Amino acid sequence: MTVSSLLKRRRGRTASLLPNYVVLTLLVLFSLLPICTLLFNSLKTTAESRLNPLGLPLRGIRWQNYPTAWVQGHYSTTVRNSGIITLGTVAGVLLVAGLASYSMVILDLPGADGLVFYLLVGSSMPAQLFMVPLFFLWNKLGLTDNLLGMIIIYSATMSPFATFLLRSYMVAIPEDFKDAARIDGASEGQIFRHVIVPIIWPGFLTAGLVAGLGAWNEFLFAVTFLHREEVKPVSTSLYAFVDRYSTDWGLTSAASVLMILPVIVIFLCLQRQFIEGLTQGGLKI
Amino acid sequence: MRDRSLQASYELKERTRQRVWRKVILPWLFVAPLLLLNVVVILGPSAGSAYYAFTKWSGIGPAQWVGLANFRRLAGDRVYHMAFVNNVKWTLIFLTVPVTMGLLGSALLAPIKKGQMFFRIAYFVPYVIASVVNTQIWRNILHPTRGIGVMLAERGLKFMDVTFLGSRGTVLYTIAFVDMWHWWGFLVVLYLAAMQAINPQLYEAARIEGATRGQEFRYVTLPGILPTLVFTVLMTIIWSFLVFDYIYLLTQGGPAHASEVLSTELFKSAFFRFEVGYAAAIGVSMSFICTLVVAGFVILRRRGWEI
């Protein structure tokens, strides 16, 4: 095949992909335009959002919505609460799932198959089945309206998937590595810290991102278990805020943007791990 | 002589003990936190639900055993029926529309080299945004007096002047639309990953045989991603029977139960009306459906399906 015919074929293929690009671009607009309307609204005055509810802010940009939303939405409290819940959940999930997957793969846990089956069944138990008795149990233990109570719940619901994810990373560790460390007289703890963790930390990062995102965004448990204003996370507090200021789109939109901003930033920085974690770990239990 | 054999048996015992410690106890200690959390948060309360479903209980005081009364009430309850039918509709919508869109998007995206990453990220963004915010976005866009419906009606599309979330005929489909908007891009990425795992030689062979793009999709792509497709179908059924966030956030099941689903009805009966036993019975009925799907999943796996 000559170079020119190769080029022609190449050009032919690119040209034939034009309809693909057109449809895919339309789909991008479908995905992102609604989010753009939120951004635009967050920069408008109430009066303008009434006259021009979906378009760009044309009468100047009103940054003031953000500090106002921060103060009136009690963000200094709710961000702190959500931050504690999120970081606590990530730490809890990684610890619990790290230990469990380590045991399954490296320590050759006897009966691992049974555990896998149990976790598969357990993680497909709907929250609606255990939520109601859990609420009354937590109430009795003083864990409702309590950030630690939420961390425990999220750690329990999210550690099965993280265990599976980390397990798939650990299976990839070559057997020689562990044996070499063991011959050198390393304890299990040392092997874990100095051999396993460096190799599978991308797995930890991925699992942590998924667990953190889940905890930050979660709504059902949060609305059920946290009622006092001082312990409310961003999600349920934002829901109440939007309800209270339903006519003031500038303010409520700014409050919404404040909630998603950290997520979007982290997502754009670590999108590969995010997508991998959510598609493989989150779904393929 | 006797001392030595005693010594040997002692050593043997000690070694066995160490072996048992290393091979059995230590590994199980490592999984103990996971099991403990799971039992306290999920398994125990789930068993609790299975018990309370047969009782009348307000959440305080002792529960009173009532046998099958809650389930009999479910069977005759109009709201439960409406909710169940809505869950079935929801399942059918989610099995068709987002799966089709996901397949379309990923099939169009698979042959593209330039910008594939950009498209993937763009489609994925709505999926990482919290349900609280996504519903807020669409509540504004679909607002009955300033939203897109009114704007389109003013520009001549009279039929678009609909109170999407306020009328009984449209509310369920509108919420499903919003939920799908945030969900379909996830499927694109998922199917795309599955498509890229297909052996490229199969495509080459198809091309040499003179297959059209449609035939390529039908005979190479679709069989290649079948495990992923089946998996998403099963998960879609489960999730459709558990859906809560988008409905609760947009309408709380209203107007007049038109968008009621099982989980919103459960939530309201437990925490608004304090009929805990009845709520537990709804939960048990929901789990039953999920169990059927999981059983199907296990059976398919036993038959050698890679899902």
Image: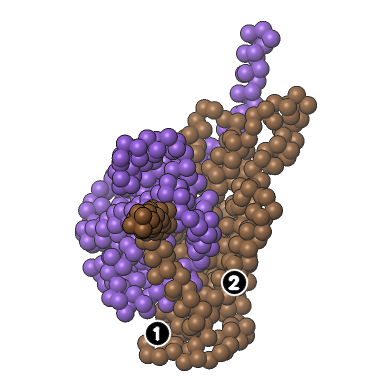
Chain colours: A purple, B brown
How far, Cα to Cα, is label 1 from label 2?
23 Å
- The label shown at residue A241 is none
Q: Quadrant of the N terminus of chain B?
A: bottom left
x 61%, y 50%: residue? B307
Q: Pointer 1: residues within 10 angstroms few (<14), some, or many (20+)?
A: some
Q: Secondary structure at mark 1?
A: loop
x 50%, y 46%: residue? A280
- In the image, farthest residue toward the right: B209
Percent position (x, y) of residue B57? 44, 88
Tag 1 near tag 2, CB within 8 Å: no
Percent position (x, y) of residue B49? 48, 78
Same-subunit check for callouts 1 and 2: yes
x 75%, y 35%: residue? B215
Q: Is residue A55 above or below residue A1?
A: below
Query: Label 2 marks which chain's residue?
Result: B
Q: Secondary structure at mark 2?
A: helix
The amino acid on which the numbered mark 1 sits, given as a three-letter code, is Gly
Q: Is residue A271 visible?
A: no
Question: Which quadrant holds residue A77?
Answer: bottom left
In front of the other: A268 or A175: A175
Residue linked to disc 1: B59
* Mark found first going from the N terminus, 1 or 2: 1
- Does A193 sit left or right of B58 as displayed? left
Residue linked to disc 2: B288
Query: Label 1 marks which chain's residue?
Result: B
Percent position (x, y) of residue B98? 59, 51
Question: Which quadrant holds residue B20?
Answer: bottom left
